[in-house]
Image (tube, rainbow, N blue to C red):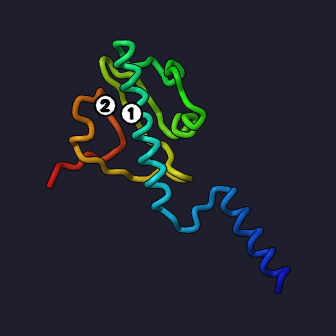
Amino acid sequence: MKVALKIIASLILIGVLSGCDFGIPEADEKFGTQNFVSAVSIIELHKLRNGEYPKDLDDLEFLGDWDGIWLSAVRYERNGDGYNLYLERGWSKKPSLEFPVKFKKGLGIKESNVTWASAK
């Protein structure tokens, strides 16, 4: 019995470490939201400090140790006086996110794969 429990626990751990989501799409949504919002925040901070959006994400300064997570989860393109930002990954898959239109008010986002919902 103990051996069977150890085998099951090992299989679950291997699945988690290998990126299996075990039917937890809300993890993709939560991480996807955090990745997108973090990207917007630091990109807009760069604009505030430097007067223009970064040419690419490598131009961003003063990043924390955890910022590499969202850097690898988004695709950024400068677009004239704004930028395009695409979410590529949540926890392990690409979620479909919806933000209120009000979120992007005053931001330089021109194109995104995020859905913008009007207030109800």
Q: Earlier in the sequence, mark 1 or mark 2?
A: 1
For residue 102, above or below residue 1: above
How far from the left and from the top, in percent, is residue 34? Answer: 44, 45
In the picture of the structure, the residue carrying the numbered disc 1 is 40
On screen, residue 28 versus residue 4, left or right, reads left
On screen, residue 7 versus residue 114, left or right, reads right
Tell me which corner region of the image, top left, top right, bottom left or bottom right, holds residue 9: bottom right
Q: CA distance from mark 1 to mark 2?
A: 8 Å
- Give the amino acid type for the residue marked by disc 1 in the picture: Val
Assess disc 1: are there few (<14), some (14-19) or many (≥20) residues with their C-alpha within 10 Å of its C-alpha: some
Q: Residue at x 50, y 24 (%)?
A: 57
How far from the left and from the top, in percent, is residue 12? Answer: 70, 68
On screen, residue 93 versus residue 38, left or right, reads right
Q: Residue at x 44, y 29 (%)?
A: 76
Q: Seen from this angle, which residue lies furthest top? A: 51
In the picture of the structure, the residue carrying the numbered disc 2 is 109
For residue 107, above or below residue 28: above
Q: Are marks 1 and 2 in contact (CB under 8 Å)?
A: yes
Q: Residue at x 53, y 34 (%)?
A: 71
How far from the left and from the top, in percent, is residue 103? Answer: 26, 40
- Give the amino acid type for the residue marked by disc 2 in the picture: Ile
For residue 76, above or below residue 113: above
How far from the left and from the top, in percent, is residue 11? Answer: 74, 69
Assess disc 2: are there few (<14), some (14-19) or many (≥20) residues with their C-alpha within 10 Å of its C-alpha: some
Q: Quadrant of the N terminus?
A: bottom right
